[in-house]
Amino acid sequence: MRNTTEIRIGGRHLVASLLVSFLAITLLLTSGCAGTAKGKNTSVFSSLEREEMSRPETSRASALVIIRYPALIHANAENFYVSSFAINAIGGDVPYGVHSNRQTSRVAQSVIEKSSYYAMSLYRELKSILPEHTVLLSPHIIDWDKQRNLYSRPILGAEQIPSVLTIDFNIYSFPDVNELMNSPPVTFGDLVTPMVVIKSSRWVQPSLGGLLVSSPQFMSSVWRQVSGETEQRLRSRLDDQPQTFESSLGFVSYLGERDEAELPLPLKGNTQGDQQVAAIERYAVEKIQMNGEVISALGDDSSVDPFVSGFVQGASTRIVDILNSLDHDKATFFDRQAALERFDPELAKVFFVQSEDESVRARLQLAEALVGAEREFLAAQSDSIYDGTYHGNYGAKMRKIISSEYRMLEQRRQLARKQNITTAVAVVALAGSVYGAVASTAASTAAVTAASGAALAGSGWAMHKTLETKTESKEVHRYFLARMAPAFDRQMSVQMEWLESKELITARGFAEFRNKTLSLYQSRVRSMQINAEPRCQFMHPEFNQPGRWYGVCANGKASGRGYGLVINERGDTLEFIGTARNGLASGSGGMIIQRSKQLGAIYYEGQFSNGLPDGVVRIEQAGLAPRLRTFKAGVDVGKAKSTKLQSLKFAQSATESNQVVP
């Protein structure tokens, strides 16, 4: 039986193993500098030279960045989330006895609480340097069921808007509080460990499914997740079903796996010179130490944000660099088509044709103007979330907590340097009490009184009953809004401009706003002179069965501009955008071929004939720099000149055209 002592905090009991703590502290103190819990002053991104956004906004119907982060956890998922958090610890192994104790549970909660707070810094910085209404917040709730296991889903509607980039952001803390002062990643006091995944459309980096940047621990799980979701989407499109998939956060996808193999994915560094290699940019785990003097003075003044200089400025610089390097039309093409499908399935099918017909372009312009209005409404919601989370009561408490944690951490650092083992043990036990406090504001206040020596203000994971959300979606929304955005449910108005007319749309929530945009669309929509055939075949010489074509069709076969898809019995997939003749790719276009169980796809862009590369073609494969080759009937016959390449052109937004008339 373990030798334990009970510590009473706020009328509750916390069991802390002083024997384990003593041994941990002894190891820490004998390891020299490891016991001082230091981190890096700045991120690897901080060395990047700041650039302005150089690419113009291509479509009112698209955002540039959607920031996704964990904000709530459903009661259904609590136990599975905590155990997964302990089992899949980043930075070291966690003793089995620690997996289910109260301290580990509170550390797991702290990841959610503090991710919500620190995500606001990234949002504010990107919002200040990118065009208006182009940065959206998408808070997620972590959930569990038998079919999906642990997963996350968006609470609000931001991810229904096309976006050039999605950024999964969370902070991280090592589950075992006995290792608080040691080397594992931790977010406590002046220390923050950010983790990210940045994705775009798979057509932006076809060989790697659109994965651009990732913390290394997430890469394999996110790759498997993206691959599975891509297959589901393609099969749904082949069956002509709506594209309604929701993608879990990279952090949650990682936690949901058990003993999965690490994949040999191609990687490149953040400051690596040759950024043209088709590889995932590796953002190594960084424990960033923010300015202690600033942290100690945090409080009601929300204008001071030490996380900006430590991480956010550099990270936002890298994000702008990525945005400047991408073809935004290519990145948003399929998401725009899916957004149009909500308004008008018939228009969504014709979208692939990119017809110059006036009736099609007029309808497309109206639909994209309405999606643009939705984007503005969601941008206003994001501002409300930011104000409530950062400037409101939640943010004020978080700043006091971070400041108090820092003072306790500094006390522990001083004791470690003095080799005062007895007092150091007591401070670690006190740190454990912070992690173990019950999830209520009252208990946090009691903990402050009990821990006067460390001047604790409570803990982020002890402020709100995040583990008591309801199953009904309305309850989830209400709970989130009460916590993070008390002014969220106010009435908001967006003015939509279409051709020479203006419409003011007013609503209290996104559901009401969408109902009004749909009604407006149906009342103003025009008939189209062009229709897509319901069944049209697309083929490839290496696939022994026909697929489906969305585009110009003649005699039941692809013949003109459009999008084609084929899936064979082995699960190999082929996608093509461009021009076709007699059911086969012929002319200029782009083609992605993904072989079943093969890591990475191969991408061809250029000229095709009878379904095969023919002429000057750009090839992209995982781990290699793109190369130009000359093909004849699908056979590589040598090098090619870039001046002869006919690059794939994705359509410009209908809202940019001056040729549409009422």
Image (spheres, grey):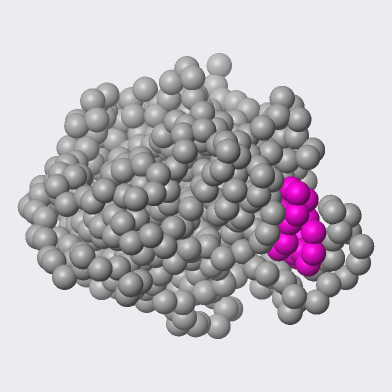
Q: Is residue 618 magenta?
A: yes
Q: Is residue 508 visible?
A: yes
Q: Nearer the viewer, residue 567 or 48?
A: 567
Q: Nearer the viewer, residue 513 or 605?
A: 605
Residue displayed at 10% across by 47% down: 508
Question: Does residue 51 sit above or below 204 in this rendering?
Answer: below
Quadrant housing residue 7: top left
Question: How far from the left and from the top, in percent, is residue 568?
Answer: 70, 29
Tell me where the magenta segment starts and ends, as one range.
Answer: 602-627
Quarter of the image for the C terminus: give it.
bottom left
Q: Is residue 519 magenta?
A: no
Residue displayed at 38% across by 60% down: 357
Question: How far from the left and from the top, in percent, is residue 432?
Answer: 43, 40
Q: Nearer the viewer, residue 212 or 579?
A: 579
Q: Is residue 311 visible?
A: no
Question: Does residue 67 sit above or below 659 in this rendering?
Answer: above
Q: Most prominent secondary structure in the magenta stretch?
A: strand
Question: How far from the left and from the top, in percent, is residue 639?
Answer: 88, 70
User: Position of 38 compared to 11: left or right?
Assistant: right
User: Position of 660 compared to 387: left or right?
Assistant: right
User: Position of 87 compared to 352: left or right?
Assistant: right
Residue displayed at 80% across by 77% down: 641
In this rendering, the count of numbered labels is: 0
Question: How far from the left and from the top, in percent, is residue 495?
Answer: 14, 63
Question: Does residue 160 sit above or below 363 in this rendering?
Answer: above
Quarter of the image for the N terminus: give it.
top right
Which residue is at the far right? Answer: 637
Q: Nearer the viewer, residue 600 or 97?
A: 600
